[in-house]
Image: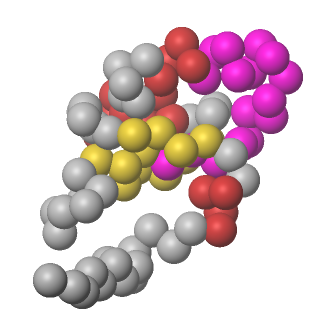
């Protein structure tokens, strides 16, 4: 969903008045050690996808919450029980 539809989503958000400088992150394989992130803005992310050949599967996170997230150095949830 995130990568394939992102050009349309970006266009719709911008036409609705969202600031083109709104942060965007695409996250591929987010639960795996080889997780990849592509960080940009509504204005830049589509070109970045093309330049880097970033591909699905990925999820898109759009909004100022991207600024609060540390994309590296997070600790996985430790599950205990039996």
Q: Residue at x 64, y 15 (%)?
A: 11
Whether residue 36 is visible, yes or no, is no
Residue 26's place in the image compared with 32, above or below, is above
Q: Position of residue 46 (x, y in %)?
A: 47, 28
Residue 13 colored in magenta in the image: yes
Question: Which residue is drawn at the image coordinates 39% and 40% (left, top)?
Answer: 59
- Count the marks: 0
Viewer-proximal residue among 19 and 70? 70
Instruction: Farthest residue to the front: give it.
Output: 82
Bounds of the magenta span?
A: 10-25
Camera-nearest residue between 77 and 82: 82
In this picture the colour scheme is secondary structure
Task: Please determine whether, in this image, residue 25 is positioned above or below residue 58.
Answer: below
- Residue 70 appears at what percent x and percent y? 51, 73
Drawn side of residue 71 relative to residue 69, left or right: left
Residue 62 makes an appearance in the image:
yes
Q: Position of residue 33 (x, y in %)?
A: 17, 69
Instruction: Indicate the quadrant containing the C terminus: top left, top right, bottom left or bottom right.
Output: bottom left
Residue sitting farthest toward the right: 17
Residue 52, picture quadrant: top left
Q: Residue 31: percent from the left, percent from the top?
A: 25, 61
Q: Residue at x 41, y 30 (%)?
A: 2
**Residue 19, magenta (yes or no):** yes
The quarter of the rendered structure image containing the N terminus is top left
Q: Is residue 39 above or below residue 4?
A: below
């Amino acid at each position: 969903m995130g990568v394939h539809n992102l050009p349309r989503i970006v266009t719709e958000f911008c036409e609705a008045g969202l600031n083109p400088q709104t942060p965007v992150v695409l996250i591929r394989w987010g639960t795996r050690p080889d997780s990849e992130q592509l960080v940009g803005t509504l204005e830049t992310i589509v070109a970045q996808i093309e330049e880097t050949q970033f591909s699905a599967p990925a999820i898109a996170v759009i909004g100022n919450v991207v600024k609060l997230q540390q994309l590296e150095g997070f600790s996985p949830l430790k599950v205990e029980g039996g």
